[in-house]
Image (cartoon, rainbow, N blue to C red):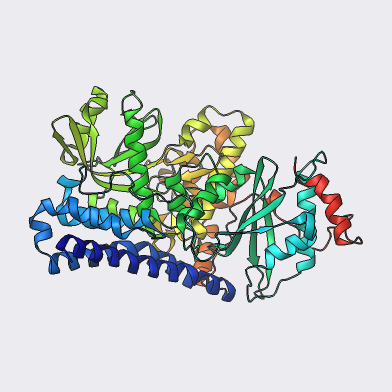
Amino acid sequence: MSIEGAIAQTILAGFNKHYRLFREVSAAAKQRFERGLWKAGREAAVARISMYDKRVEEAVHAVRQAFPQAEQDETLWPRIKIAYIGLLHGHLQPELAETFYNSVACSVLHRRYYHNQYIFWRPAVSTEHLEGERPTYCCYYPSARGMRRTLLDIVTAFRLLNGFENLRRDVRNLLAALSHNFPKSWHPQPNFQIQVLNSLFYRNKGAYVVGRAINGSREFPFVVALLQNAQGEVYADALLLDPAHLAVLFSFARAYFMVDMEVPSAYVAFLRSLLPDKPVHELYTMLGLQKHGKTLFYRDLHHHLKHSSDNFVVAPGIKGMVMAVFTLPSFPYVFKMIRDHFAPPKDTDKKTVKEKYLLVKYHDRVGRLADTLEYSNVAFPLKRFDPALLQELQALAASNLEIEGDELIIKHVYIERRMVPLNLYLQHADERRLQHGVREFGQAIKDLAGANIFPGDLLPKNFGVTRHGRVVFYDYDEIVYMRECSFRRIPPPRNPEDEMSHEPWYDVSAGDVFPEQFATFLFTQPRTRETFMQLHGDLATPEYWTGQQKRLAEGVQEDVFPYPDSVRLPRDGSVRTDDQAEDDDVVASGLLEELLP
């Protein structure tokens, strides 16, 4: 065997080990859900995030140890790449294997080889129509089986060891929800079927059935959320039919799903049909394949730059004291660089800021923390930077920049989805939007507290509003665990002079937080302040925060639902539908006319 072939095999062996371990952790989510091992689930999620870098390090070490010439003779790498492509014939994760190869090659060859023929700048192997030993999804035919039996088959197909709390009730609820959400002017076509992915999607305390109904030329996505009661019995908690609800469930502000996938590209293709507006890189990231998500995002960025002409500019909003932030108006993301120096009162350093972002990377984001893509040594076309932006970046973060010919190299950058800063949203909001924004703001803080996160800087400028109206936190330089805070009540003034003083008359230690100051400190407008106190006045009391700390210390994992209460299914037995006393086939024929538009 040639040396190029041997190196290629070494790299692929490293990837195969990585994906085998990735699947083992993901598949074990079923057992963790069945046993209610929520803490173990969080630990597994953290471990899975770090797997990729460990396997890359192992592969780099193996290549350097066995083939020192791979680092010394760069002319080997075009032939290594060709040999590697040959090994991917018939491989079930070729796109992920290519990304793994890039990671190893760039570590061995260093930055100067990021943009050349030595790596997979474009995919070399197609993933279209890849299939493993097991089909990616199952098909169900309600016209033949009956709708009730079809739903029963779907929710029991995953063979969870837990019993159902009330399976008959759950099927009735699902039927009633379908009837409520779809009009009656519908007729089944010969191809009417329901397709369901073969693995449940596990995250936090939930398991999700993901599928689509097909009738004629139309497709209708759906998700059934399964939860457990205190006795460990399973119940259907929600049926998601609105694409906006699905987009929130699969959003960039939540931790990654655990899904057992033999062929990940087939799962992504299925999900793309449910969420056509969601970029492919976000779908891979949402499935826990964030390294390949980064690869696809980088390709998307360069494709967009090639097909656009607007310039990078300073991002709108109040400037932060830690980050220099810029954006490309035609591209829905912001780019954040750590400043070289922080103005008072910021008392931190670059190392600490990076640690805060790393904390978020490994933490459960519960739909309230923006996912961040972190890159090193990124090359941008220099001519696409607005002169005012370039001047600002050189003034604020010169150590993070290099100019090489016609390219601007940014040594370290965070990239996030662009959102409307909450302060700007509230500033221009009418009464309805004001109520919504403040309600979401307070709920975001509560969701984060339940996940053991105190944002630190609660100013609305550090929160953003997504296109689905969700409020998400995105400024992480002061983020801390709840246990690191001491929530205190402000002592009464000792005399009138204390009350008039601009300085506190009481001792303040590191970690002290005084919730009574929140409303006044966070909102300058009386109307907004009053709305906050009406909707979330409990956040302005130390008792709320100490109570939450106690629950965390007791190991309580809060329920944070990635869907609105309006789609949750009742559990009190009060639901009654016309199908309860009828034969399955009669029920099916009646519901089929109401199921889909």
Residue 480, horizontal then vertical, whole percent: 38, 57
The percent position of residue 495, horizontal first and vertical second, equals 44, 48
> Closer to the camera, 534 or 157?
157
Q: Residue at x 89, y 61 (%)?
A: 583
Q: State the image quarter where residue 512 is shown.
A: bottom left
Compared with 456, 434 (above or below) is above
- Say which residue appears at 21% left-offset and 35% top-offset: 396
On screen, residue 403 versus residue 46, left or right, reads left
**In the image, is residue 559 above or below residue 283?**
below
Total numbered labels placed on residues in the image: 0
Foreground pick, 14 / 561: 14
| Residue 533 visible, this angle | yes
Position of 409 relative to 310 (above/below): below
Give whichever of 240, 469 is nearer the camera.
240
Determine the residue positioned at 54% across, 69% down: 556
Quadrant where the N terminus sits is bottom left
**Quarter holding residue 499:** top left
Q: Is residue 493 visible?
A: no
| Residue at the farthest right position | 581
Residue 25's x, y, as percent?
Answer: 44, 70
Estimate the x, y position of residue 465 in percent, counting from the top left: 50, 38
As rendered, which of 105 and 123 lies closer to the eye?
123
**Quadrant of the snapshot with the C terminus:** top right
